[in-house]
Amino acid sequence: MKPILMTVTALSIVALITQKVNAIPISSIQVTSNTISQATPVDISLLAKTITGFLQSDRYQTESQILVSAKNQGIDFTTYAKVKTIAQSDGKFRSEITFTRQGEQPKPPTLVISDGKQVSVYKSDSKQYAVTSYDNFGKSDDYFLIGMSSSLFLQIPSDTRKIFARGQLSDKEILQQIGLTPNLDLKADQRTVEGESFYVYNYTDRKEQLTFSGFVQPQTATLKQLQISGKSQGLDILIAEKILNRTANPAVTPQTFTFSAPKGAKKVKSLSISPF
């Protein structure tokens, strides 16, 4: 969760969009916003408490909705995904991803499974699958599609997570662990989105002109949404993950993080998760 990890994740997403979205025809899709924003001093204590809570368990199941939007004067592109991911701090995860565009039927789900060493991607619509190393998948443009929150969780080494989980670090020490200082372009505001109040932390990478935002429910110190916004190659980029449910210590079996190719599935050299 160091700033560099946030930036790498953001750049992967932006690279994916800007490479492919320019080929998409103009769309009439509109993204509506119901947000009221008010600047506020940075609450370091709440941030530290949120981070500690986020890393309390070594395994989480996260159900979320992802929005990807890219716009300029000639392009208006928006796609959505429903994601269900079980992530474990040893690099194992299982993710089911279903994409949809407004006015279209949802695409068949894509299954992504990691055993901690290699990652298998299976697309049920084409009955194809591909296998790559965990490191290569982590560097790919598709990594964020298992959920930005799960991606960030998986980037925290197990030993580091345990340090946070003990709850013995001071607020300052927690910030140091993730590479943040109060004056490191860290800002905050209070927003009301669809009637719900959030305390929002914003970290801006000045070089890449991208802002990484975390929406926190202040009463419970719970992360509810992650967002990346900015400009790239003339496009206004917005990627948001709304966390619908995040459950600690979900039940797993030996098969949870094991991929077995379905009968008739064809193995291919590579396979992109992205539908765009």
Image: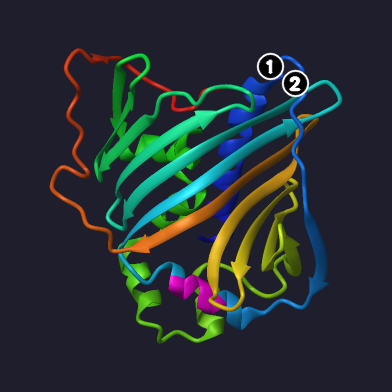
Residue 116 higher or lower than 243, as above or below: above
Alpha carbon separation for disc pair 1 and 2 = 8 Å
Q: Nearer the viewer, residue 20 or 157?
A: 20
Q: Residue at x 63, y 36 (%)?
A: 68
Reading the image, the residue beneath label 1 is 24
Q: Position of residue 243 (x, y in %)?
A: 52, 55
Question: Residue 16 bears which disc, if any?
Answer: none
Q: Residue at x 54, y 75 (%)?
A: 221
Q: In the visual, does 66 lie left or right of 98?
A: right
The stretch drawn in magenta includes residue 23? no
> Which stretch is magenta?
48-53
**Residue in view at x 33 percent, y 50 percent:** 86
Q: Quadrant of the C terminus?
A: top right
Using the image, determine if residue 87 lies above or below residue 41. Answer: above
Q: Mark 1 or mark 2: which is in front?
A: 2
Vertical order, 78 against 252 (above or below): above
> Does the magenta segment cover residue 50?
yes
Q: Residue at x 83, y 68 (%)?
A: 38
> Residue 141: image x %, image y %?
51, 33
Please give the label number shown on residue 27.
2
Q: Cβ–Cβ below 8 Å for labels 1 and 2?
A: yes
- Number of numbered discs present? 2
Left or right of 116 on screen, residue 191: right
Element assignment for label 1: loop
Name which quarter of the figure residue 153 lies in. Answer: bottom left
